[in-house]
Image: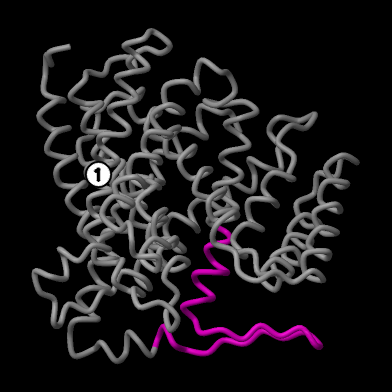
């Protein structure tokens, strides 16, 4: 599949998927704050068991969504990253400088904002990475509301920035949010990875063997103490992109098949399962508490300052140029929209504050929703004003 068609399809799916994410999150909030809340919680607590011989995985449905289905989301991210690095918008250093610099600012500054508001509370500091990532589907969904008034170059800037952002989040999860490790499971996971690499080097082009070994890898990583979703990224990096027939690329075929399932199924289901914050008893203190405040401020202020500040610096010192057809107001709007953390922030929050073992479990969601919603509305307003005809450049 030609790269141009892949990018066009990416924007179409991400934008529509972002709007569906908004609907799923709103539905979860409505149901869990109505007389049907018992049904919502019963749905998420439904026990699901998978067993083959002595290998047994028994988890409530919520964890199957977060650990299982989200592995497919990370598989898709891995496929997108590999495609962009080998033949897309990350293939040349000149293409990476501006979004890469902006992404670094968008990860470091939000974490520092969270640290400034939570330093001294060891338990709270586990959530330092929550405001670091950008929800590209949600952000592109907001941009989609403005149609062709937003230049394609700006969408590509946001897409590349968010992909680098997600890659940074993956590294953070691997390094800081893994549990106690099982040497046997890690050894078996290593054997699975070796098999995947060997198939790639031997020229295996059928997807079936990769997916079969990938499933085994997921089980091993799940049992190892390293977060299971990382298996999706490793699998993606082992799937071949280039073949003798460019129209039969295993990577592009899998990405093409997986994207609608993730955009229209997995991510909205994840949003529905994790965004249902009970609002009974919510007071002003619920928003001013240092954990949700740190997350909301990190997303709204930290992301804006980090992304816009380093973008301005990179262009000012001459190592990058402003995206073609864009103005500084639009860049500011994109910087604000990067504060829509939502999916990845909710995911990192579930790792940072584990229900049943952390006093802050669930508290983070108030900050994530507040910061993400404010970033969406303010970013949209700034973009709408900045995208009028004959903007000042």
Q: Quadrant of residue 256?
A: top right
Residue 137, above or below 320: below
The image shows residue 303 at horizontal and vertical percentages of 29, 40
Which residue sits furthest right? 202
Q: Is residue 314 left or right of residue 282?
A: right
Count residues near mark 1 (Cα–Cα under 10 Å), then give few for <14, some for 14-19, many for 20+: many
Looking at the image, which residue is at 19% across and 76% down?
A: 30
Q: Is residue 271 left or right of residue 46?
A: left
Q: Nearer the viewer, residue 163 or 309?
A: 309
Looking at the image, which residue is at 47% across and 67% down?
A: 351
Q: Nearer the viewer, residue 105 or 206?
A: 105
Looking at the image, which residue is at 37% across and 17% down?
A: 314
- Label 1: element kind: helix
Point out the stretch of residues depicted in magenta: 43-72
Q: Is residue 48 magenta?
A: yes
The image shows residue 41 at horizontal and vertical percentages of 35, 86
Q: Quadrant of residue 176?
A: bottom right
The image shows residue 66 at horizontal and vertical percentages of 50, 69
- Residue where numbered disc 1 is placed: 142
Q: Quadrant of residue 273?
A: bottom left
Q: Is residue 388 magenta?
A: no
For the C terminus, give its image quadrant.
Answer: top left
Total numbered labels placed on residues in the image: 1
Which residue sits furthest front? 120
Q: Is residue 374 left or right of residue 67?
A: left
Q: What coloring was used for the rendering? A: one colour
Looking at the image, which residue is at 21% across and 58% down?
A: 293
For the N terminus, give its image quadrant.
Answer: top right
Q: Is residue 179 left or right of residue 372?
A: right
Residue 116, above or below 33: above
């Amino acid at each position: 599949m030609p790269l141009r068609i892949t990018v066009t399809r990416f924007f179409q799916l991400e934008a529509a998927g972002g709007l569906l994410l908004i609907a799923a999150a709103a539905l979860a909030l409505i149901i869990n704050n109505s007389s049907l809340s018992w049904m919502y919680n019963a749905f998420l607590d439904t026990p699901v068991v998978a067993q083959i011989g002595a290998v047994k995985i028994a988890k409530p449905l919520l964890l199957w969504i977060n650990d299982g289905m989200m592995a497919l989301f990370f598989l898709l991210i891995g496929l997108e990253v590999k495609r962009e690095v080998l033949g897309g918008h990350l293939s040349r250093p000149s293409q990476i400088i501006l979004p890469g610099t902006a992404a670094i600012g968008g990860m470091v500054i939000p974490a520092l904002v969270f640290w400034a508001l939570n330093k001294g509370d060891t338990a709270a500091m586990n959530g330092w990475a929550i405001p670091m990532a950008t929800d590209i589907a949600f952000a592109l969904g907001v941009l989609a509301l403005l149609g062709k008034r937003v230049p394609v170059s700006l969408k590509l800037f946001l897409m590349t920035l968010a992909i680098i952002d997600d890659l940074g989040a993956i590294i953070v999860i691997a390094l800081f949010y893994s549990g106690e490790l099982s040497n046997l499971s890690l050894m078996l996971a290593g054997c699975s990875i070796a098999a995947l690499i060997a198939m790639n080097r031997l020229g295996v082009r059928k997807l079936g063997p990769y997916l079969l070994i990938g499933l085994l890898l997921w089980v091993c990583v799940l049992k190892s103490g390293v977060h299971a979703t990382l298996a999706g990224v490793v699998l993606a990096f082992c799937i071949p992109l280039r073949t003798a027939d460019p129209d039969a690329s295993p990577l592009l075929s899998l990405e093409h098949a997986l994207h609608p399932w993730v955009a229209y199924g997995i991510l909205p289901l994840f949003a529905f399962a994790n965004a249902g914050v009970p609002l009974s008893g919510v007071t002003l203190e619920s928003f001013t508490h240092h954990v949700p405040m740190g997350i909301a401020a990190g997303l709204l202020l930290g992301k804006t300052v980090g992304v816009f500040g380093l973008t301005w610096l990179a262009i000012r010192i001459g190592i990058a140029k402003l995206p073609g057809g864009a103005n500084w107001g639009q860049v500011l709007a994109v910087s604000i929209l990067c504060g829509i953390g939502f999916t990845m922030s909710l995911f990192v929050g579930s790792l940072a504050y584990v229900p049943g073992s952390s006093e802050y479990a669930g508290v983070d969601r108030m900050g994530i929703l507040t910061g993400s919603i404010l970033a969406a509305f303010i970013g949209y307003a700034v973009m709408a004003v900045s995208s009028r005809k004959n903007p000042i450049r």
